[in-house]
């Protein structure tokens, strides 16, 4: 049969006590606790175990438990060869004239069949139910199971061990969190040091070279061409912010792009139109709700590359459009 498991839980740790179930009926279980067999109501143990919050109900159940056998003392021969007289200590209760209940411990003698008596280690025991039936209406066997105090002592020892283990666990956790926080602080300080060093390094590389590189790239590349090499590139505002790491990294990449551009011969357009008026169509909005927006700009330069038209605006920005009915160019001069 399975054991009845009592789990004593702390904040972070737990221990278990296991009591063997010797027998069970529809409404009760017979449990071996510390060498004594105790009947407990099954309905009180619908859960697999008890946590520290449920110890008081457990103690109450043990206190009211029916013990399997009662200590008796042999007092003489019985009326037959198969029976003997046995003395039993019982509690007699009575009320005085004021309604107060008084208790006294008395000894009763009963004739019990010898086959019912169990002898263990020079001690004799009779079945609890048999003895209880022989008592008078105001006589009772001592309440509760005498092993309850030993169970409480064992659980108290376990609870103390768990408490100490919790303190150790919490101390280790606090030390771990303190170390983790110190490590995070050190990593952040290291990150800030490395950031400052990188800003200083990039500033030395960028300070004298950024503006010539910007000028070269404005003349040589369109914005989409630059964005192929530098993701999310935007023309920076002047004066340049040389304290911002993101701006410095972008300018450093732009300088590298300008250096590579100087070493390569630019692709020559098929034709260039200067000082022209350009009209084109942009589509704005979502795919299901697109709107046609007509745009125009004067004093533009248009470079022809096959069917692609690169439109350079007066402020230096540029866009690419494909030849078609949505693009119109009104030229005033033609440069071969």
Image (spheres, rainbow, N blue to C red):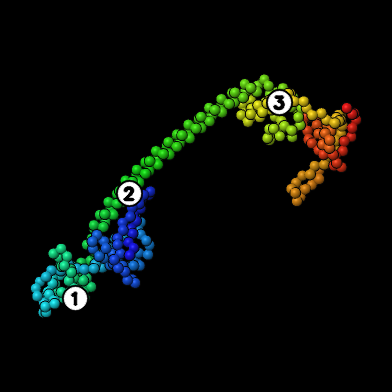
**Crowdedness of circle 1 by 10 Å Cα count: few (<14), some, many (20+)?**
few
Q: Nearer the viewer, residue 249 or 235?
A: 249
Q: Where 148 falls versus 182 (above or below)?
A: below
**Crowdedness of circle 2 by 10 Å Cα count: few (<14), some, many (20+)?**
many
Q: Quadrant of residue 168?
A: top left
Q: Quadrant of residue 46?
A: bottom left
The mark nearer the N terminus, 3 or 1, is 1
Per the image, label 2 sits on a secondary structure element best described as helix
Is any part of residue 140 visible from this angle? no
Residue sitting farthest toward the top: 208
**Crowdedness of circle 3 by 10 Å Cα count: few (<14), some, many (20+)?**
few
Residue 260, disc: 3
Mark 3 vs mark 1, CA separation in Å: 112 Å
Is any part of residue 322 visible from this angle? yes
Q: Residue at x 33, y 65 (%)?
A: 1
The mark nearer the N terminus, 2 or 3, is 2
Residue sitting farthest toward the right: 332
Q: How many marks?
A: 3
Q: Nearer the viewer, residue 140 or 58?
A: 58
Per the image, label 1 sits on a secondary structure element best described as loop
Q: Give the residue at mark 2.
A: 162
Q: Where 4 falls versus 197 (above or below)?
A: below
Residue 69 locus on image (x, y percent): 21, 68
Per the image, label 3 sits on a secondary structure element best described as helix
Residue 210, disc: none
Residue 262 locus on image (x, y percent): 73, 23
Q: Where 61 falls versus 215 (above or below)?
A: below
The mark nearer the N terminus, 2 or 1, is 1
User: Is 7 positioned to the left or the right of 213 in the image?
Assistant: left
Q: Give the residue at mark 1.
A: 134
């Amino acid at each position: 049969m399975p054991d009845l498991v009592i789990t004593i839980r702390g904040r972070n740790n737990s221990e278990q006590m296991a009591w063997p179930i010797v027998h069970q009926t529809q409404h009760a279980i017979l449990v071996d606790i510390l060498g004594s067999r105790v009947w407990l109501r099954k309905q009180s143990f619908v859960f697999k175990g008890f946590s520290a919050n449920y110890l008081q109900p457990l103690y109450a159940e043990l206190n009211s438990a029916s013990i399997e056998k009662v200590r008796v003392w042999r007092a003489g021969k019985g009326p037959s060869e198969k029976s003997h007289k046995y003395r039993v200590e019982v509690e007699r209760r009575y009320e005085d004239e004021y309604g107060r209940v008084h208790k006294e411990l008395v000894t009763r003698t009963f004739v019990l069949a010898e086959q019912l008596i169990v002898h263990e280690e020079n001690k004799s025991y009779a079945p609890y139910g048999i003895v209880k039936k022989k008592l008078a209406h105001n006589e009772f066997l001592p309440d509760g199971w005498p092993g309850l105090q030993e169970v409480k002592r064992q659980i108290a020892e376990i609870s103390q061990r768990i408490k100490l283990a919790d303190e150790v666990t919490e101390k280790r956790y606090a030390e771990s969190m303190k170390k983790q926080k110190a490590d995070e602080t050190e990593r952040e300080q290291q990150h800030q040091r490395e950031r400052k060093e990188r800003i200083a390094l990039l500033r030395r590389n960028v300070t004298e070279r950024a503006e010539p590189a910007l000028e070269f790239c404005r003349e040589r590349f369109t914005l989409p061409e630059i964005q192929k090499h530098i993701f999310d590139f935007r023309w920076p505002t002047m004066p340049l912010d040389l304290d911002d790491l993101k701006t410095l990294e972008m300018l450093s990449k732009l300088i590298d792009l300008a250096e590579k551009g100087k070493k390569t011969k630019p692709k020559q357009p098929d034709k260039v139109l200067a000082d022209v008026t350009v009209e084109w169509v942009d589509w704005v909005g979502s795919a299901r709700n697109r709107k046609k927006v007509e745009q125009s700009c004067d004093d533009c330069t248009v470079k022809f590359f096959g069917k692609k038209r690169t439109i350079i605006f007066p402020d230096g920005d540029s866009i690419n459009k494909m030849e078609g009915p949505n693009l119109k160019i009104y030229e005033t001069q033609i440069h071969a």
